[in-house]
Image: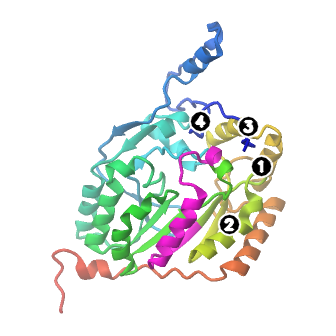
Amino acid sequence: MKNKFTQLRLKGRGAQIRIPNRFSSRQTEPDPSHLALQEDQENLLFPDTATRLVEVHPKTILNKMESPDLPLDWSMNPYQGCEHGCIYCYARNSHEYWDGGAGLEFETTILVKPQAPRLLEEAFSAKSWKASPVVLSGNTDCYQPAEARLKITRRCLEVFVKFHHPVGIITKNSLILRDLDLLLQLAGENLVHVNLSLTTLDEGLKRVLEPRTSSAARMLKTIEVLSRNGIPVRVLAAPIIPGINDTELRELVRRSADAGAGDITYQVVRLNGHLGDLFTDWLGKTFPDRAEKVLGRIRSLHDGKLSDSRFGRRMRGDGVWADLIRQQFRAARQSFLPENTLPAFNLEAFDRYRPGQLTLF
């Protein structure tokens, strides 16, 4: 079957260009004009797109979340950068703070934090720590491909089990099923919510939109396995991109509900920072016939801009297209998943089982 999507220059990568780091005082750009062969030009433009893992050793692992749009107080990221390569990912911009770039470097240079489990245990052992759900991960995916070998996320989950501490997990990788044993222990005390990102059911679109994530079929199976084992699952239909995947929203809700999801929510796309340039380049190479129409609709969500930083509105948008998406989601939810059945986090178990804690009983 012929691929209906325009052939991308780089297979297996979301970003098709490198983006200079805005904090760097010196920038270099390749000049392929003196090379006669197109193959040589491409090798110069993209000399190495293999994934590179770099160990880093931060002093702390928990990050305070200040956004009123997010329901939890803390997040942690065992990895910075993400090999999944989602072209729309808001976390791309944060790679600049690690001396990287938001484009290809974000998905090819992955910073790993092997000491994350130890740092998490030290935080929970502090007498001043009070139980509050921690998000794994608030920035980049804690189950990206490197996790299969490094198992940093699994060791972090062992700490959550040890301390009977609540955790919310966000991922778009079925690798999470490897840790079903730990999730079962956490779910037995209402200490875990799993948030699975499902952007599209179209496998061809998925391969170019978020090239190294698990397939839609595997993600639906993951919802089914987790829910069948009593592990609370919320589906994140995000981001909704008008002109790309917005017509799938009703079917996304239906299939998620059929698989056993206990809740579902959505967000619209927003292209802050370098994402505007990255997404525009990707769109022109992938959907040249509709690129301007899609960009126009994205701008209509955010007062004529591709970016949006307004709390309360940046994830839902404004205007005609935002209203159409909102109405479509509400109708689908009412039909297939009218109630949120996820249990509240248990915040009491941590104090009962804190190592060294004295109790009356």
Percent from the top left, x then y, of residue 55?
32, 40
| Magenta span of residues | 207-235
Q: CA distance from mark 3 to mark 4?
A: 12 Å
Q: Secondary structure at mark 2?
A: helix
Query: Could you tell me the amino acid type at mark 4?
Result: Lys
Looking at the image, is mark 2 or mark 1 nearer the viewer?
2
Query: Could you tell me the amino acid type at mark 1?
Result: Arg
Q: Identify the coloring.
A: rainbow
Q: Nearer the viewer, residue 140 or 122?
A: 140
> Would you call the spot at circle 3 few (<14 residues within 10 Å), some (14-19), or many (20 or more)?
some
> Would you call the spot at circle 4 few (<14 residues within 10 Å), some (14-19), or many (20 or more)?
few
Q: Tell me, yes or no, if residue 222 can be seen here.
A: yes
Q: Residue at x 45, y 79 (%)?
A: 230
Q: Is residue 201 above or below residue 19?
A: below
Q: Secondary structure at mark 1?
A: helix
Q: Nearer the viewer, residue 125 or 187?
A: 187
Q: Nearer the viewer, residue 234 or 179?
A: 179
Query: Could you tell me the amino acid type at mark 2?
Result: Leu
Residue occupied by mark 4: 11
Q: CA distance from mark 2 to mark 1?
A: 24 Å
Q: Residue at x 80, y 51 (%)?
A: 297
Q: Secondary structure at mark 4?
A: loop
Q: Residue at x 72, y 39 (%)?
A: 286
* Of the image marks 3 and 1, the number of the one nearer the N terminus: 3
* Of the image marks 1 and 4, the number of the one nearer the N terminus: 4
Q: CA distance from mark 3 to mark 1?
A: 24 Å
* Disc number for residue 252: 2
